[in-house]
Amino acid sequence: MDIFNIMPTISTAFIVISAVLVAIGWSQIIKGKREQHKRTMTMAAIAAIIFFVIYASRTIFVGNTAWGGPDNLKTIYLVFLLFHIVLATVAAVFGLTTLYTGYKAKYNKHRKLGRVTSVIWFITAITGATVYVLLYILYPGGHTKPVIDAILGW
């Protein structure tokens, strides 16, 4: 197994780690452990960034994995994938905003936003892990053309 085949496993692990850290951070703030919460949420953000760097690198240079399952499930999978992508984008924007409000000590906004952001992040992580299981465990597919090749016309 080469590095490009292990990248989806590694990136999925980082997004799951990020969600677990968010859950731990949520528990810490409920218990009033503000400094621990801040460190844990920073680690959660770093794990999410590592996920994104690995995911984006693989997409640009290797390509995304094509659906390898039965044709009768393809439409359902694509709708699920679209839901995940939209949710992940929303979660990223909410996550950055929540981090910003926390670091700027705008705690009323941070508290309200954090509750929503955390739930969205959990759903994003679960749907992302589900996409991984569908593409790499249940129905392994092939690779599409790398984005960089498509852009450069190779």
Image (spheres, rainbow, N blue to C red):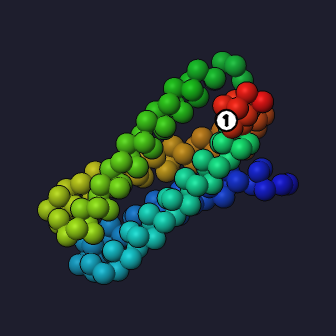
Does residue 107 lie above or below 95 as drawn?
below
Q: Hey, which residue is sitting farthest top in the picture?
A: 72
Callout 1, which amino acid? Val
Task: Give the quadrant of residue 148.
Answer: top right
Q: Hey, which residue is sitting farthest right in the picture?
A: 1
The answer, for residue 65, to whether it is visible in the render is: no
Does residue 107 lie above or below 131 as drawn?
below
Q: Secondary structure at mark 1?
A: helix
Closer-to-camera residue (70/55): 55
Residue 135 position, x and y percent, is: 68, 39
Residue 31 position, x and y percent, is: 26, 77
Closer-to-camera residue (54/13): 54
The answer, for residue 116, to whether it is visible in the render is: yes
What residue is shown at x 42% (from left), y 42% (from top)? 89
Left or right: 37 in relation to 142: left
Task: Give the quadrant of residue 141.
Answer: top right
Q: Which residue is mark 1?
A: 147
Task: Give the quadrant of residue 28.
Answer: bottom left
Residue 140 position, x and y percent, is: 76, 38
What residue is shown at x 78% (from left), y 30% (from top)? 154
Left or right: 14 in relation to 118: right
The crowd level at tag 1 (other Cα within 10 Å; few <14, some 14-19, many 20+) is some
Does residue 153 lie above or below 138 as drawn?
above
Q: How many marks?
A: 1
For the N terminus, the image quarter is bottom right
What residue is shown at x 50% (from left), y 48% (from top)? 126
What residue is shown at x 51% (from left), y 43% (from top)? 127
Q: Hey, which residue is sitting farthest left in the picture?
A: 108
Left or right: 106 in relation to 78: left
Residue 145 position, x and y percent, is: 74, 32
